[in-house]
Amino acid sequence: MISPSAWFVYCHVHGHKDPNFAGMSRFRARYSVARSEITLDIHEVGEETNAAYLELFQLFLAYSALDTFEQVTKKPGRTVIQDSECARLMRGRYLEDFTKPLALSLSGKSKKRHMQNAEKFLSGESEDLRVFIYALRNLFCHGALTAARLDLTNSKKKRQLVRALSEAVLLASEIQFQKYVDSWSIQQTGNSVRRYFEDN
């Protein structure tokens, strides 16, 4: 199983005593699936279409891991997801491609907040990609987003961008888990993870 980099440390500082251990184990399992080499073989579709759906599926899995972590820690939607190259492309070359799904996916009480977050990102006030990733994930999960709609089938570079977004999500979850483990280590041992291993 491919674990978050801090998982061994978490177990070493008595993670099994953590009231959230079962939830963190679910996070680890989903993270592992998202990090695994996955293949997809959709019946009677072309190679490019298959590759496009694979990237959307990987994004769904990555977001699922982060979502699980945030549910366990009771901090839904708090993690900032950043990647400078993704941000550059999404503000420039692929602006229209990624703002259309956003408009389609948002509704209800949270729409105003999400649109404000999108506007902050597009203006350069914020570097948080999350609102766009959230939109892609929702539309894909609910069947409203096809590979053709984003033109992923005909564009390898767009597929690479979706893959980079998945990596950004997984990196953000790694960072948040590392912070969680450090906090847990202080509770259990009185020291940060680094100090604990220096002393032991």
Image: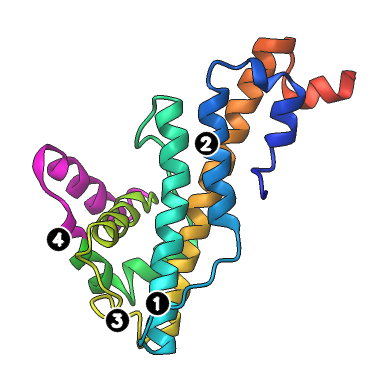
Secondary element under disc 1, as helix, strand or loop, is helix
Q: Quadrant of the C terminus?
A: top right
Q: CA distance from mark 4 to mark 1?
A: 20 Å
Q: Are marks 3 and 1 in contact (CB under 8 Å)?
A: no
Mark 2, secondary structure of its residue: helix
Q: Counting other residues with Cα less than 10 Å from the Cα at mark 1, is it few (<14), some (14-19), or many (20 or more)? A: many
Sort mark 4 into few (<14), some (14-19) or many (20+) by Cα contacts within 10 Å.
some
Q: Do residues under tags 2 and 4 come within 8 Å of each other at their CB atoms?
A: no
Q: Within the magenta stretch, is there residue 107?
A: yes
Task: Work out whether mark 3 precedes mark 1 in sequence or the reverse, and give the earlier one.
Answer: 1
Q: Nearer the viewer, residue 152 or 126?
A: 152
Q: Residue at x 13, y 43 (%)?
A: 112
Q: Which dot marks residue 151?
A: 3
Q: Position of residue 192 (x, y in %)?
A: 72, 20
> Residues in magenta?
102-126
Going from the N terminus, do you reach mark 4 or mark 1 first? 1
Going from the N terminus, do you reach mark 3 or mark 4 first?
Answer: 4
